[in-house]
Amino acid sequence: MFVINCKNYEEIAGDNIIKFVKIAEKISKKYKIKIAVSPPQHLVGVVANSSISILAQHIDVSKTGSTTGFVIPELLKKSKVKGSLINHSEHRITSKEIEKLVLKLKELKMISILCVKDISEVKKYVKLNPDYIAIEPPELIGSGKAVSKEKPELIAKAASIVNNSKNKTKLLCGAGIVSGEDVAKAIELGSKGILVASGIIKAKDWNKVISEFAKALV
Ligand code: G3P
């Protein structure tokens, strides 16, 4: 048996991974072959071909080529991923990495959504001029208690900092948002949109809840 590690070589990026697997598949009828892929960038093609913008949850500071297991923005781009969250509360990274990744996404013309946990981080990171800053108090994430109702002053303050900065960064907020009313409240407080997970993903009727949230954003 042999294992082929695709690593993060550009030669295998985008649709090339599909061609490669098909070739190996034929040969594997005779010989035992296994292929080690990087799921974020090699398997995303299926959804990223959608007309909706697909983003990554995380990216790493690493390079294409002989690297293993990192999420590489350049390769995501080849798989039609449009951008990424950076520094999500559940996957925090250093400020040096944050800076490099915001710059990298800019260079690649990909969307950057920089997640922060409080006002001091809003002030610090708005200077990097990401496309979006998403403020999420970690203790409210997944709680069902909406940030827009529990901490309205936090959103209002973050909105005044972001909206009054000289750059084009827009504010998003998230954590515990579960209804159209929570969304509307966030917008009323100055947020330009929301970042949400459980309120939608765990709902019984996805069509109903996505439509409800979308209407509240208008
Ligand atoms: O990435 C969004 C997330 O942190 C908010 O989670 O489940 O509170 O909507 P949730």
Image (cartoon, helix red, strand yellow):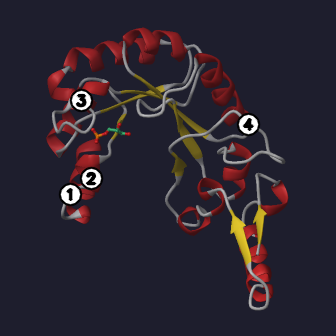
Q: Which mark is residue 62?
A: 4
Q: Which mark is residue 140?
A: 3
Ligand 1 lies under 8 Å from the Cβ of mark 2? yes
- At label 1, counting other C-alpha atoms closer than 10 Å, the crowd grade (few under 14, some 14-19, many 20 or more) is few
Q: Residue 57: where, in percent of width, then height?
A: 50, 44
For residue 48, above or below residue 187: below
Q: Is residue 135 left or right of residue 188?
A: right
Q: Which residue is mark 2?
A: 200
Cβ atoms under marks 4 and 3 closer than 8 Å: no
Marks 4/3: CA–CA distance: 31 Å
Q: Residue 164: where, in percent of width, then height?
A: 44, 12
Question: What amino acid does circle 3 point to?
Answer: Leu
Q: Residue 14: where, in percent of width, then height?
A: 72, 62
Q: Which residue is mark 1?
A: 203
Tell me which label, 4 or 1, sits earlier in the chain. 4
Q: Tell me the quadrant of ligand 1.
A: top left
Residue 157: quadrant of the picture? top left
Of labels 2 and 4, the one closer to you: 4
- Residue shown at the point (64%, 36%) measured from the top left: 60
Q: Is residue 218 visible?
A: no
Ligand 1 lies under 8 Å from the Cβ of mark 3? yes
Question: What amino acid does circle 2 point to?
Answer: Ile
